[in-house]
Image (cartoon, grey):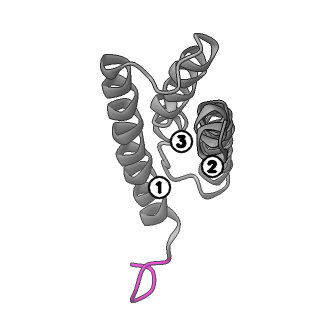
Amino acid sequence: MNLFSLFLVSLPEEITRMASLNSWIMIVAAGFLWITFVLFGIIAKRYEKVLRKKTEWQFIIIAPSGILVYAILQLLSVFEGNLKMPVNTGRIAYSLFFISGILSLLGALRFRRVVSPRRGGFK
């Protein structure tokens, strides 16, 4: 057995291990991102109480739910032993992740509009 064939035999195990590690890292990162947006919504709720202006903090907390669904679908795929999510599941998961990101951006921009000072002083 030469060195080249030995390398080919051990390669799939290494690829499988790296793909599994990448999936776990992605699940943890999506979880942290979701927690970050929920904390951002809690901060917006407190600003609403202090400033007595509507910050729409409920939207900021609900908007990143697609990120959590993505992480759950990715986790289910890892538990099934797949290197990648199945095509239909992947389309759903990535679509929800994208929509959730857009909605979270809109919530953050609305919150910014509420808390940023107005130019020209108070009227």
Indicate whether 44 appears above or below 74.
Answer: below
Indicate whether 109 appears above or below 94.
Answer: below
Q: In this view, does 13 lie to the left or right of 113?
A: right
Q: Residue 39 occupies which quadrant of the picture?
A: top right
Count neighbours of disc 3 (C-alpha within 10 A) and say few if under 14, some if 14 to 19, many if 20 or more.
Answer: many
Marks 2 & 1, CB-CB < 8 Å contact: yes
Residue stretch rendered in magenta on the structure:
117-123
Q: Is residue 104 left or right of residue 30?
A: left
Marks 1 & 3, CB-CB < 8 Å contact: no
| Residue indicated by mark 1 | 108
Residue 17 in percent (x, y) is at 68, 33
How many marks are shown on the rendered structure?
Answer: 3
| Residue indicated by mark 3 | 57
Which of pointers 2 and 1 lies earlier in the amino acid sequence? 2
SS of the residue under disc 1: helix
Q: What kind of secondary structure does the magenta stretch mostly adopt?
A: loop
Tell us which disc is closer to us: 1 or 3: 1
| Residue indicated by mark 2 | 40
Indicate whether 96 appears above or below 101.
Answer: above
Determine the residue positioned at 50% across, 36% down.
64
Tell us which disc is closer to us: 2 or 3: 2
